[in-house]
Image (spheres, grey):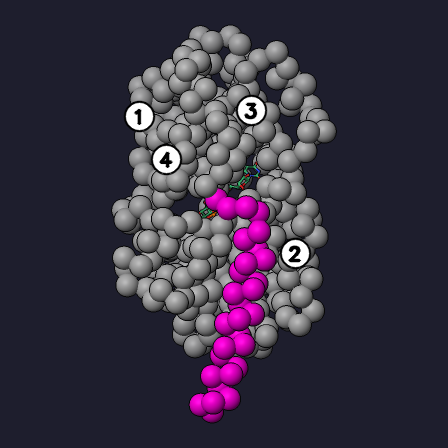
Amino acid sequence: MKIMLVFGTRPEAIKMCPIIKELKRHQEIETVVCITGQHREMLKPILDVFQVIPHYNLDIMKEKQDLFDITINVLQRIREVLDKERPDIVLVHGDTTSAFATALACFYMSIPVGHVEAGLRTYNKFSPYPEEFNRQAVDVISDLYFAPTDCAKENLLAEGKEKETIFVTGNTVIDALKTTVSKAFSSEILDWAKGSRLILLTAHRRENIGNSMQMMFEAIKEVVEVYEDIKVVYPVHMNPVVRQTADDILGETDRIRLIEPLDVVAFHNLMDHAYLIMTDSGGIQEEAPSLGKPVLVMRDTTERPEGIAAGTLKLVGTQKADIKKHLIELLTNPDVYQSMAQAKNPYGDGHASERIIRILSEWAENRSSTTEIHP
Ligand code: UD1
Ligand code: UDP
């Protein structure tokens, strides 16, 4: 069997590399890795950590790329790679435009698609944007669904996907997390934060850019100015518009540090040492529950209800007053803090990659025996 894995952004790399690492133990499977290059600087350190050398790089990234740029360039450039390799199945991940355009190309070329992290939904096509559309579109095309949780499986079943094609595997992010967090971790940021409560901040979502992101940053700045025992570290996404907003609002604030994006080992360990996390990220909502870190999710919707049910996540929207209220509550009410700081892990046991490979092997076997009976 020949499997091709295609991905392009930081979160996809963090969640696909554990599968590639596991595939290295399966000599009977030919593995081809193609990166779209939707991200450049933010992808490289992850490939280095997991020692993954891609066979192809479509190298599409350009500054301030829009959704047309990503879709058109991936679609055009992947055609040749798919045509040359003719894999038995292509694995895509999650909800990025790299995943959507790759799945579309596979559909046009009649190549089966396996969707890793299938079935997440908000059912609001504008939130997150364009991810909710991307993930639903990928699921229309996919042949195999690797759902991280029962809830994701239920979504797929409710949409009429065939039960035999859906597998609950856990999320591969837990596979990654098991290899990165270490009690021995030290860093200059932790030295700087010693004696303070450290808030880890990230923000990058397309639909938040503009007024919502300004409101988030202003809320945090105003709270930091009052509570002197807190410090904030923000590894700023490389999107130039996000950088400008972060610089303008948070750049000159005491006890707030804007730093470059961290490699995944440093970031996971910083999460592990943080007092609380504020974010609009998707992946961080999956990692925080197993580390027992309270997260204020600065979004109006989440496709990760498991973390809300576990009590670790609170959806606080993007209004300044709401963010301030919830942040102050978490800083001043120990009962609220403790209730959110319980380590729970709704995302599996860290063996999702093994399961995915086992399912793919069985699928390939069934396919070849079916082909023999019905040539
Ligand atoms: C993309 C995904 C989003 C995911 C996020 C993870 C889409 C439409 N969006 O959004 O689902 O949550 O990645 O971070 O698929 N840039 C660099 N270097 C990099 C990466 C980005 O300079 O290594 C800059 C470029 O100017 C680029 C911009 O950031 O144009 C935005 O990148 P893009 O991939 O379009 O959007 P993200 O917000 O990163
Ligand atoms: N992350 C990282 N370095 C950083 C910030 C985040 O390695 O400086 C990791 C984080 O642990 C998570 C993933 O990147 O696994 C989330 O990526 P992002 O927030 O960019 O995308 P999303 O998950 O929202 O699609």
Q: Nearer the viewer, residue 76 or 352?
A: 352
Distance CA(mark 1)–CA(mark 3): 24 Å
Q: Give the mark toward the camera: 4 or 2.
A: 4
Which residue is denoted by mark 3 in the rendering? 274
Report the residue at 48% width, 86% height from top: 371
What percent of the width, then of the height, locates residue 347? 48, 44
At label 3, the amino acid type is Ala
Q: Secondary structure at mark 3?
A: loop
Characterize the local packing of mark 4: few (<14), some (14-19) or many (20 or more) Cα atoms within 10 angstroms: few
Q: In the rendered view, does 218 fall on the left or right side of 261?
A: left
Report the residue at 44% width, 55% height from top: 168
Report the residue at 58% width, 77% height from top: 84
Query: Which is nearer the N-term, disc 2 or disc 3?
Result: 2
Distance CA(mark 2)–CA(mark 3): 29 Å
Which residue is denoted by mark 1 in the rendering? 319
Query: Which is nearer the N-term, disc 3 or disc 4?
Result: 3
At label 1, the amino acid type is Gln
Distance CA(mark 4)–CA(mark 1): 23 Å
The answer to if 158 sits in the magenta stretch is no
Query: CB under 8 Å between callouts 4 and 2?
Result: no
Which residue is denoted by mark 2 in the rendering? 21
